[in-house]
Amino acid sequence: MDAKAGQSYPKSAKLSHNRLTSIEIGRNSRQIEHSPLTVVFTPMMSPYSTHNHYQPGSCNIGTPELRVRKLFLRIFSVATLFLTAGSIIWAHSVIIWSLMLFVSFSAIVLFFEIRYRFCILFGFFNLSNFKQLGHLEEVKDHNHIRKDRKRVAEILVKSFCFALVYATAVHLMIEKVHGH
């Protein structure tokens, strides 16, 4: 605690002439300068980070696995667009609507897997992979497994909600246009 200023600062804070000039939070920090105060911080796990190791509930796949998911995301996105167009032609088809729901759900799951660097199947079955494809490692820590399963549930619920909203919105818009 600085007696003159009457304020307390973290141990990582740097004082100059009784003024706070910088503070560091975390490790591997980025620095942002703004005179006279410099703040150094470490952001939370970014979806675009280059972490290439297992982090419970946050990251369980590496670059090779991400490439595969990006390819499948392209395929499922195109399929979603085709089924959306098909639902315009066959407006009352429950089969088309169901397929659109399933395919859009799959595309959204893949999107979240890429964004979070987290495979829901690996998370459910206590696995991770940061090496070449097919080289799976088992997660054994029960706390890590619990965090992974929580992330799996989060991705599944979010994906289903978004897919249901999308498929229903497309159906309702088409119904309104067709006037039925």
Image (cartoon, helix red, strand yellow):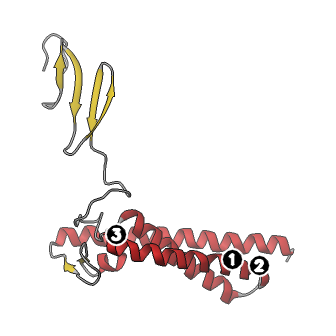
The x, y position of residue 75, in whole percent, is 54, 79
Residue 118, labelled with which disc?
3
Residue ID at (32%, 28%): 33
Q: Could you say which quadrant of the image residue 96 lies in?
A: bottom right
Q: Residues within 10 Å of mark 2 (few under 14, many from 20)?
A: some
Quadrant including the C terminus: bottom right
Q: Nearer the viewer, residue 73 or 89?
A: 73
C-alpha span from label 1 to label 3: 28 Å
Q: Could you say which quadrant of the image residue 18 lies in?
A: top left
- The residue that label 1 is drawn on is 84
The x, y position of residue 90, in whole percent, is 77, 85
Q: Amino acid at mark 3?
A: Phe
Figure label count: 3
Which element carries disc 3, helix, strand or loop?
loop
Q: Nearer the viewer, residue 87 or 32?
A: 32
Residue 51 versus residue 161 in the image, above or below: above
Residue ID at (15%, 32%): 12
Residue 94 versus residue 34 in the image, above or below: below
Which element carries disc 2, helix, strand or loop?
helix
Which element carries disc 1, helix, strand or loop?
helix
Q: Residues within 10 Å of mark 3 (few under 14, many from 20)?
A: many
Residue 79 placement, left or right of 64:
right
Q: Are marks 1 and 2 in contact (CB under 8 Å)?
A: yes
Residue ID at (44%, 67%): 112
Q: Amino acid at mark 1?
A: Thr
- The residue that label 2 is drawn on is 88
Quadrant including the N terminus: top left
